[in-house]
């Protein structure tokens, strides 16, 4: 409704000589009407502690049920899991538009919020007015009342947030992101906006997406730098991690974290890998591996506690339909201390287990998901932090331990997901870092700025990366990363 500024009305009244006191009363009345007709979130209507004579709700029709003399609409506006039940009586003016209010249609309803005689809901809305803002053809609307498979819903990822399950996931996702910022802000960390376009490969694994404005088939003229003519005049990629930049800022602001999208062109079609995913990467100056493990454990606990406190209704949906053990597991993750285990001991446990793993375990081999899950799901039955990995299987920037065989790395493993966090103390000694870069077969020159941090005021520092989607998989029990990110990007999939 159009809202006139109070002073406009007052000036008009003064101009025409009307009584200002009466006019103020008119304004107040008009404000009350405006307020009554403003859209109220269904979540707030359902939480009302009193009946309300005149309210307006908007949303999408989930179902319509016709009875003798009236119809029931279940309307959802995304503000919460629950629907608002709307009663449209045959003798109400709202009835005229009812025929168009089919599943999927967008509607606006005005009416009275009254106590509901029906079981399972406190309030219902008695419609006095019904407007169908956007009809949905019942023949072709893809979301029908029956349960759809996750695979099918991925093909309509533009509509799946209108289902109970996906609405719940994306509300939890939003709340979990808020928990991240809250956690770090309370501890004096600064949020660093690390760049998405980059000229360096943080993980040194070469799994990057190239960014270019060069025409498709430009064959690089013999011997010439193929990127000289490109936008940046050099090779550019989408970042795999904001860590290197976070290290630079940690050695200036002390404690920082990044939280944004990262990109990996690894061609692994697993339920745990996406080509675009969000990562949280704290970096702390004056910190070692123990501080790093402490922070990772605290963060996972705080995020878990936060969603348990703020997303109870949505989480209950997963506890009922996806994983019956969910709440018990989350409570343990939020409360119990995590196991801390050197890599060598983890290998010993796996070898002793007598399990026939698909991938063999031996000192020097990277732990696979099956090993990680065995450790935290069967052996310890709780989150496990494995640390001091062999140097050969970890990135160049991880601090070399005194044994010269292992690095001060740590992975936090959680039930059902495996690796949730990967981090390390960083190599702060210039000469050692230069040696490690050379050993990794990388060129040191593009990392001149990274090395500068070791030249000027170098300090022990540490950090980690937490995969945000992996956290959501853990928090909801959802088994596929494609179902906890709004629009998944995986090999051969880039719809929407
Ligand atoms: O272990 P990663 O590769 O570590 C890093 O990128 C470091 N630079 C982090 C740091 O120390 N600042 O990735 C960190 C986490 C993993 O533990 C995993 O949870 C998640 O990011 N992750 C992925 N999530 C979804 N899809 C992928 N392809 C992922 N790759 C890593
Ligand atoms: Mg890792």
Image (cartoon, rainbow, N blue to C red):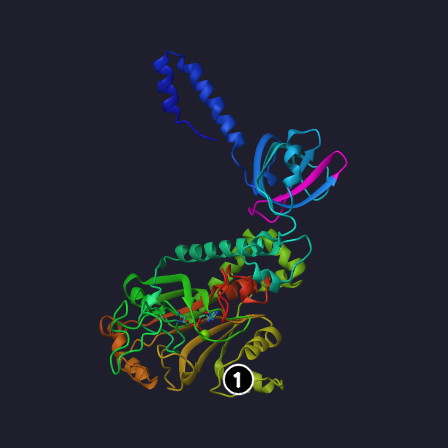
Q: Give coordinates of residue 41: x percent, y percent.
A: 55, 41
251 with respect to 135 (left or right): left
Instruction: Give the labeled residue for mark 1.
Output: 347
Q: Give coordinates of residue 320: x percent, y percent.
A: 67, 58
Residue at point 42%, 56% (across, down): 181
**In-front residue for pair 417/148:** 148
Q: Hey, which residue is sitting farthest left in the picture?
A: 456
In the image, residue 97 above or below residue 62: above
Residue at point 53%, 81% (across, down): 346
Q: Is residue 317 visible?
A: yes
Residue at point 40%, 65% (across, down): 281
331 with respect to 458 (left or right): right
In the image, residue 340 above or below residue 128: below
Image quarter for residue 415? bottom right
Image quarter for residue 111? top right
Disc 1 residue crowd, few under 14, some 14–19, many 20+, Cα 10 Å: many
Q: Is 131 covered by the magenta stretch?
A: no
Ligand 1 quadrant assignment: bottom left
Element at badge 1?
Answer: helix
Q: Is residue 335 visible?
A: no
Part of the protein shown in magenta: 67-84
Image quarter for residue 259? bottom left
**In-front residue for pair 367/162:** 162
């Amino acid at each position: 409704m159009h809202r006139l500024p109070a002073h406009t009305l007052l000036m008009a009244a003064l101009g025409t000589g009307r009584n200002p006191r009466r006019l103020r009363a008119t304004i107040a009345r008009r404000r009350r009407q405006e307020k009554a007709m403003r859209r109220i979130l269904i979540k707030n209507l359902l939480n009302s502690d009193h009946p309300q004579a005149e309210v307006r709700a908007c949303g999408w029709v989930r179902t319509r049920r016709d009875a003798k003399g009236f119809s029931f609409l279940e309307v959802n506006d995304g503000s919460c899991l629950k629907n608002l039940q709307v009663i449209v009586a045959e003798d109400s003016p709202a009835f005229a538009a009812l025929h168009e209010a089919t599943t999927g249609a967008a509607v606006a309803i005005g009416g009275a919020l009254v106590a509901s005689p029906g079981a399972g809901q406190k309030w219902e809305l008695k419609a006095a007015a019904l407007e169908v803002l956007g009809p949905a053809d019942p023949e072709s609307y893809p979301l029908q009342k029956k349960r759809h498979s996750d695979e099918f819903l991925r093909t309509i990822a533009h509509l799946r947030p209108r289902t109970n399950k996906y609405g719940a996931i994306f509300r939890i996702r939003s709340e979990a992101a808020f928990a991240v910022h809250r956690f770090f802000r309370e501890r004096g960390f600064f949020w660093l906006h690390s760049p998405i376009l980059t000229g360096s490969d943080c993980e040194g694994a070469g799994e990057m997406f190239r960014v270019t404005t060069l025409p498709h088939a430009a064959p690089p003229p013999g011997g010439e730098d193929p990127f000289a003519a490109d936008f940046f005049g050099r090779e550019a990629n989408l970042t795999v991690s904001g860590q290197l930049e976070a290290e630079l800022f940690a050695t200036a602001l002390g404690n920082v974290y990044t939280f944004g999208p990262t990109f990996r062109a690894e061609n692994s079609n697993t339920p745990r890998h996406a080509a675009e995913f969000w990562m949280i990467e704290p970096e702390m100056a004056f910190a070692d591996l123990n501080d790093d493990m402490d922070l990772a454990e605290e963060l996972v606990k705080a995020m878990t506690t936060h969603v348990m406190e703020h997303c109870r209704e949505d989480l209950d949906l997963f506890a009922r339909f996806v994983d019956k053990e969910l709440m018990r597991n989350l409570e343990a993750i939020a409360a119990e201390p995590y196991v801390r285990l050197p890599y060598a001991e983890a290998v010993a446990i796996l070898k002793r287990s007598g399990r026939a793993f698909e991938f063999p375990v031996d000192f020097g081999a990277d732990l696979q998901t099956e090993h990680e899950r065995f450790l935290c799901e069967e052996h310890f039955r709780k989150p496990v932090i494995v640390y001091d990995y062999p140097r050969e299987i970890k990135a160049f920037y991880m601090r070399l331990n005194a044994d010269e065989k292992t690095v001060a790395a740590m992975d936090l493993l959680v039930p059902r997901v495996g690796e949730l966090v990967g981090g390390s103390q960083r190599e702060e000694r210039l000469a050692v870092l230069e040696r490690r870069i050379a050993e990794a077969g990388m060129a040191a020159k593009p990392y001149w700025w990274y090395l500068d941090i070791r030249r000027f005021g170098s300090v022990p520092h540490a950090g980690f990366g937490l995969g945000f989607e992996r956290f959501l998989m853990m928090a909801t029990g959802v088994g596929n990363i494609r179902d906890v990110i709004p629009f998944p990007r995986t090999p051969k999939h880039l719809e929407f």
